[in-house]
Image: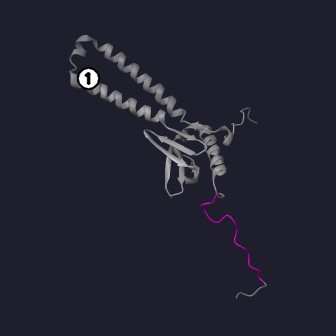
Amino acid sequence: MSDTPAPHPVDAQSLPHTWRPFGARIAGSVFGGMLLVLLVVVWIAFGAQDRARFDTFQRATLVFLGLLGFATWFALVRSRVSAQERGLTVVNGYRRRDFEWAQVLGIQLRRGAPWANLDLSDGTSISVLAIQGSDGSRAIDAVRALRGLIAEHSAEPPRRRDGPTDPPAASDPGTPPD
């Protein structure tokens, strides 16, 4: 038996609630910080004579590449999914999408998938970068909580994708067909 406490269920009383990626944010922050420190140390280690060989365009290129790396990291850190009374807000990088509960049919995190997918009523699905498969049990708990919220706020009972929810009625073998 595990000593880990059960995750706190998310219900309508605890809204709004936001989920963010964990492992990817930590890894991006740590490795980005290490890369920045390495670049500064190498730049200083070059010495004044070697640094003077870099012209303005080369320095601007290095700054641009650094800003591009920062923008990529910030897009990952910014990713989130928020549940409110009116619906879900999904932020993937620099794109924000707002959905009413009626538009959201379900959420899946398939085994080995990099992130969760949200199924929408228009027949499309979108990736939810805030729920990363690499986060393990945190991701599974987030998907379960969102499934509960979707079920709680949906107007009709959930339908299975692989067939009808009720078995077909059995015909009476003693009654002749019409």
In the image, taking residue 46 as reference, residue 168 lies left or right, namely right
Does residue 11 appear in this view? no
Above or below for 108 versus 1: below
For image coordinates 50% across by 34% down, the residue present is 24
Secondary structure mainly formed by the magenta segment: loop
x 63%, y 60%: residue: 160
Q: Residues within 10 Å of mark 1 (few under 14, many from 20)?
A: few
Residue 76 image point, x, y percent: 46, 35
Verify whether residue 73 appears in magenta.
Answer: no
User: Residue at left 25%, top 16%?
Assistant: 51
How many numbered discs sit on the rendered protein? 1
From the viewer's side, name the closer residue of 68 and 52. Answer: 68
| Outermost residue, right side | 174
Depth order, front residue of 70/14: 14
- State which quadrant residue 16 falls in: top right
Name the residue that disc number 1 marks: 59
Q: Is residue 172 left or right of residue 112?
A: right
Residue at the spot 72% in from the left edge and 73% down from the top edge:
169
Quarter holding the C terminus is bottom right
Which segment is the magenta one? 158-173
Residue 174 in the image, given as x and y percentages of width and height: 79, 84
x, y percent for residue 53: 20, 18
Question: Quick check: 41 left or right of 31?
Answer: left
User: Any magenta on residue 170?
Assistant: yes
Pick the residue in front: 156 or 58. 156
Q: Is residue 119 above or below residue 140?
A: below
> Disc 1 residue type?
Arg
The answer to whether residue 170 is visible is: yes
| x then y, percent, for residue 120 | 53, 54
Front residue of this view, candidates 55 and 1: 55
Q: Secondary structure at mark 1?
A: helix
